Image (cartoon, rainbow, N blue to C red):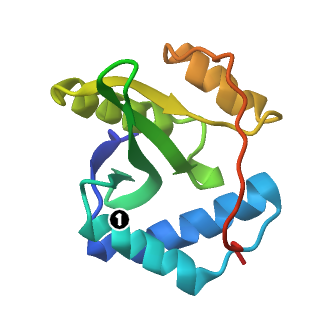
Amino acid sequence: MDAIKTRLATATDVDFILDSNKNMAIETEDVGLDLAQLKLGIEYLLKNPAEGLYLVAEQNDHRVGTLMVTFEWSDWRNGRFWWIQSVYVPAQYRRQGVYRAMHATVTQWAKQDPEACGLRLYVERDNHIAQKTYQQLGMAETHYRLYEELLRPTE
């Protein structure tokens, strides 16, 4: 098996990221997304790196995974959390180290950011496989619960 390579996403990855997010929403939440709105959101982040980034994993010149990182300033820590979001690995590439490679890259990049204070992510409460993976990579469940109030519809 050839090594998994990771890289910063570019505009040529928009369709792959779009499909990945569409598939993730269906698989994890049984939700259909407004694809035009999603595409605008992906393109926005690619054009505004201060807001975050997309990472793409490749193997044998095929895209095999993606994730998004956004940034949150913590006044308590006087530092920036790197939030890992929108993780997707197509089914045929799962359990082969794709997420592990992406996580290692994000960790490496965050450690190079002098303002980074940690990595965070949220995961569906019933996604036990993902939770185990995150724990094996050194992440720990926090005591926080996530709440939200949507100000505009997602569909």
Image position of 79 with respect to 58: above or below = above
Q: Report the number of numbered marks.
A: 1
The image quadrant that residue 22 belongs to is bottom right
Q: Position of residue 139 (x, y in %)?
A: 53, 17
Q: Residue at x 35, y 65 (%)?
A: 45
Instruction: Determine the residue located farthest toward the bottom in the rendered image.
Output: 36
Q: Position of residue 110 (x, y in %)?
A: 27, 30
Query: Disc 1 marks which residue?
Result: 45
Instruction: Determine the residue located farthest toward the front in the rendered image.
Output: 75
Q: Position of residue 84 (x, y in %)?
A: 47, 40
Q: Residue at x 28, y 27 (%)?
A: 116
Nearer to me, 84 or 152: 152
The image quadrant that residue 134 belongs to is top right
Nearer to me, 101 or 124: 124
Q: With 85 as the anchor, is 48 left or right in this view? A: left
Q: Secondary structure at mark 1?
A: helix
Q: With 109 as the anchor, is 130 left or right in this view? A: right
Mark 1 residue type: Leu
Image position of 64 with respect to 11: above or below = above
Q: Position of residue 79 (x, y in %)?
A: 30, 26
- The image quadrant where one finds the N terminus is top left
